[in-house]
Amino acid sequence: MVTFAKDEIISSTTVARSFSSLLNRLKSRRLEKIAVIRNSEMEAIILPLREYELMLEVMEKDEYKNLYAQLKERLDTPLDRYVPFDDALASPVAEPDA
């Protein structure tokens, strides 16, 4: 769970009025992140660009790791379990669990 310091929780009104100043505080690392609050609920998080890029890199690496695991599993599938392409197309697609 992500935690926020008191000065990182800011109302949407204050963010709108002080946006430039808040961006400067993020850029200079006086703030690590900003939680934007509207109607007593957290609506958004503002991060420095580099933190966002790092987050995307981690997510992308995780996606590649999962894809690799799926491909490896498929490579280990015995040939007698393969379904011909035309049969796969003719088969109804199962809906994922909601």
Image: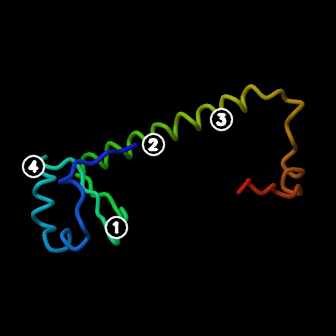
In primary-sequence order, the first of circles 4 and 3 is 4
The residue singled out by tag 2 in the image is 60
Q: Whole-Å distance between the Cαs marked 3 and 1? A: 42 Å
Of tags 4 and 3, which is closer to the observer? 4
Residue 57 sits above or below residue 98 on the image: above
Query: Is residue 32 shown left or right of residue 68?
Result: left
Query: Is residue 67 shown left or right of residue 51?
Result: right
The residue singled out by tag 1 in the image is 40
In primary-sequence order, the first of circles 2 and 3 is 2
Query: Is residue 74 shown left or right of residue 30?
Result: right
Q: Residue at x 90, y 30 (%)?
A: 80
Q: Whole-Å distance between the Cαs marked 2 and 4? A: 27 Å
The residue singled out by tag 3 in the image is 70
Q: Whole-Å distance between the Cαs marked 4 and 1? A: 28 Å
Give the amino acid at mark 4.
Answer: Ser
Q: Position of residue 54 (x, y in %)?
A: 32, 42
Q: Whole-Å distance between the Cαs marked 4 and 3? A: 42 Å
In primary-sequence order, the first of circles 4 and 1 is 4
Residue 78 sits above or below residue 41 on the image: above
Q: Whole-Å distance between the Cαs marked 2 and 1? A: 33 Å
Q: Position of residue 60 (x, y in %)?
A: 45, 42
The residue singled out by tag 4 in the image is 28
Give the amino acid at mark 2.
Answer: Glu
Secondary element at image label 2? helix
Give the amino acid at mark 3.
Answer: Gln
Q: Position of residue 62 (x, y in %)?
A: 49, 37
In primary-sequence order, the first of circles 2 and 1 is 1
